[in-house]
Amino acid sequence: MCRREINEEPVLKVSHLKKYFPMGKKQVLKAVDDVSFEIYRGKTLGLVGESGCGKTTCGRTCTGLYSRTAGEVLFKGRDVHAMKGQERKEFTKNVQTIFQDPYASLDPRMKVGDIVAEGLRIHHMVSGKQEEREIVQELLNQVGLQAEHASRYIHEFSGGQRQRVGIARALAIKPEFLVCDEPISALDVSIQAQIVNLLQKMQEKMGLTYLFVAHDLSMVRHISDQVAVMYLGKIVELTSSEELYTHPAHPYTQALLSAIPIPDPDVEEKRERIVLQGDVPSPIAPPPGCRFCSRCRFADEKCRTEEPQMKKIGEGHYAACHRVV
């Protein structure tokens, strides 16, 4: 799916990935249910959808933080969930995560300098304290902080500054791949733009590859090369960022895009707003057929009984809907 014409191996290849959580009494929560995508070097895949759709679980399963139920995750051709010992340690050096809540993911008892330097010490990447101090100061400067911030604690910073510390920590060991797990959702809008611009700047400078997990489609557009739209554990549409925003095919994608405000009152007044009715079904007992059918304005009997398969509807454009051809 979305394979390049040139013979290039994807940095991350996810094939039919499933992650189920047992809920007792023989019930199973299908958080990620048969998801496939590829991300190539230096590119960004935006994984979007509303809260509870399985985005974060997918990202964490891709990095091995969660074990898989089924399917395969290959990083540069190697099975992530089969890695052990030195191979696993090398993988954790090459793949880092920027978490949604930096205050929860960064140790409040450690000074910022030690937080940023922790990976350098674990992977023996510095020869002494002086080199470590210089690298930490350079990283803090790169993410828009000052050298003197190294001696402070996380609680002394604003939300945007904390996220910058999280980014510096992730970049310290020079990874190749970053999972950005809703890194801007807890921040003010003005700060969100700063963090996204910083991530783009570091991507260009270091040749990084991103899996960018978010629910804000307007922000995802600016950073992503491709976008995968997720609903109730499944990807329902996958295409380039430009194609998704100009020609959305799946009814769920169309509804999400219609909710993005346009800063032109004349255009905003005339365009159609698609309001979804009802609640998201339970991932413990998803409906038969299409999982979106209970909220879809176009749903018919086929949608309620037959599950749509992901199919190619254009160049690099895939959707799982009976309506699209």
Image: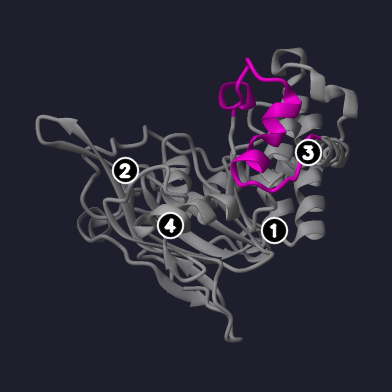
- Where in the figure is residue 263, as x and y percent of width and height? 81, 40
The residue pinned by badge 4 equals 236
Q: CA distance from mark 4 to mark 2?
A: 15 Å
Q: Height in image: 317 above or below 66?
A: below
Decide which of 104, 304 is in the foreground and name it. 104
The residues colored magenta run 101-129
The residue pinned by badge 3 equals 132
- What amino acid is at disc 4? Val
Decide which of 30, 269 is in the foreground and name it. 30
Q: Earlier in the sequence, mark 3 or mark 2?
A: 3
> Would you say residue 105 sits in the magenta stretch?
yes
Secondary structure type for disc 4: strand
Label 1: how many Cα within 10 Å (few below 14, some 14–19, many 20+): many
Q: Give residue 208's mark.
A: 1
- Where in the figure is residue 108, as x and y percent of width and height? 63, 16
Label 3: how many Cα within 10 Å (few below 14, some 14–19, many 20+): many
Q: Earlier in the sequence, mark 2 or mark 1?
A: 1
Q: Height in image: 138 above or below 228?
A: above
- What amino acid is at disc 1? Leu
Select label 3 or label 2 by which is in front: 3
Q: Earlier in the sequence, mark 3 or mark 4?
A: 3
Q: Earlier in the sequence, mark 1 or mark 4?
A: 1
Secondary structure type for disc 1: loop
Q: CA distance from mark 3 to mark 4?
A: 45 Å
- Picture quarter containing residue 164? top right
Q: Give residue 294's mark.
A: 2
Residue found 79% across the figure and 31% down from its top: 191
